[in-house]
Amino acid sequence: MLRRYWRLAASLLFCLLSYTLKSTSRPAAAAQLGPAYEILDLVNQVRARNGLPPFQINAALMAAAQNQANWMASNNLYSHVGEGGSNPQTRATAAGYSGYVSENIVGGTNLSPRQGVLWWENSPVHFNTMVSERYIEAGAGFATGFDQNFYALVVGRPAGSEPAVNVAAPQTEPLRITPIELAPPREDGSIVHVVQEGQALWTIAAYYDVDLEYLQLINNLSEDSFIQPGDEVIVRLADGQSPPPTPTPPLTHVVQTGENLWSIAARHHVEMATLLWYNNLTENAVLHPGDEIIIHLAPGQAPPPTPTPPLTHIVQSGQTAWTIAALYGLTLEDLLALNSLPPNPVLHVGDELYIRPQPTSTPTPAPPTAPAVPAGQESAAAQLSPATPAGFVLAPTPVPAIVRPGPSPTPTPIVAAGSNPAGLMGLAILAVALMTLGSGVIVAVKRR
């Protein structure tokens, strides 16, 4: 019988360890499942950094994305138009998805999933697809062909569910992309890319894995500049060459159609909390085209009063402990510790979670009360206090009172400080009871 219990306990322990290891190795598992799942994991990381819930994986969208990736790899084409003139919506419907979709595509020689997501981050229209509140489900596909890697991301919202307000505008026209061949370094160490038809500055930045703003800086371009086929774009300066001074960043941003607070903050590399603070907005504020948003303070401009940070967070639909922790800059372990939650907690809409330590109120000790002076006695402080030397301050010192003859006080029994005769008697009785109980327990054990 005992051996069976040991086997059962060992089996339960093995299951618990297996589940724990599985839950703590999800990022690594995404890469092991293949580039398509790695793309989804990286996209959800982008959403978490912007305070958004992750996309839920949908099998039909996975099939639609994979079909388009296969078609692009077979034909060496980068296009949202697929086999038979299909578009993202018709492909998703054919795969069995009932809802509205949008699609991102990218590819290139030895292009990794991380480079592909970086490429989308540098493109406003593709970035909006990743951080849109309109879509809640996603699928991804990956294929190789003609020595290139092809990726497709399809995001969707089921039919019958209303999209959130202030959503990003969906893509209405297919976007064709020309693959980029990386230019080798020149003799002076510089790298210069010659622009081809269909290439944009942000595509060049993504393929060369450089920051878009740095590319604009060393080429003296702005975010609204256009490049034409045949233009030479400096990707890396010559050895020993210093970049020009960084231009002063703009102070405000005028909201364009399809933009929201998340995309504006990411575009200008401003913390979301800072953007809300400067503009006295909440994270659910609705923006309209033409609104002017403060993104930086002018020299000498005083910031608005610091708002009191929230103490708790109300769980919304689609949010998990991980996304809530990322929203407030916490680790998952910090959030669980603040709320005394177990690993992998199940959250429900409307649950209230602490996102910072609860304030502790320490009672202020009452000032000491001076002892009452018996009637008829007077203080001789003025007579007995010595003169205080210059430069010193003496703490108040109790002065003996003058006692006049009177009746002798009744002697009071001396009791140690903090003691209570009645309490001592109670403790003695309790000790005897415990000794008796203890002896009874010992006898009972001996009889067995």
Image (cartoon, rainbow, N blue to C red):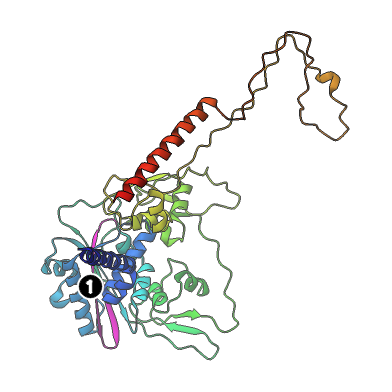
- Quarter where residue 130 is shown: bottom left
Residue 156, how many percent across, how many down?
A: 21, 62
Residue at left offset 44%, top offset 66%:
223
Left or right, 387 with respect to 418, comes to right
For numbered disc 1, what is the local secondary structure? loop
Compared to residue 354, the image places residue 150 above or below, namely: below
Asked whether residue 46 is in view, the answer is: yes
Residue 86 in the image: state x and y as whole percent. Answer: 15, 72
Residue at 33% over, 77% down: 198
Check if residue 308 falls in the magenta segment. no
Q: Residue at x 77, y 31 (%)?
A: 395
* Relative to 426, 318 lies left or right: left
Secondary structure that dominates the magenta span: strand
Total marks placed: 1
Magenta span: 133-152
Where in the figure is residue 307, as x and y percent of width and height? 48, 43
**Residue 428 screen position, x and y as percent:** 49, 32
Q: Nearer the viewer, residue 49 or 448?
A: 448
Mark 1 residue crowding within 10 angstroms, few (<14) / some (14–19) / many (20+): many
248 or 120, which lies in front? 120
Task: Name the quadrant containing residue 67.
Answer: bottom left
Location of mark 1 (residue): 80
Q: Quadrant of the N terminus?
A: bottom left
Question: As shown in the figure, which amino acid type bears the numbered disc 1?
Answer: His
Q: Is residue 139 magenta?
A: yes
Residue 260 visible, this orientation = no
Comparing 51 with 148, the one in front is 51
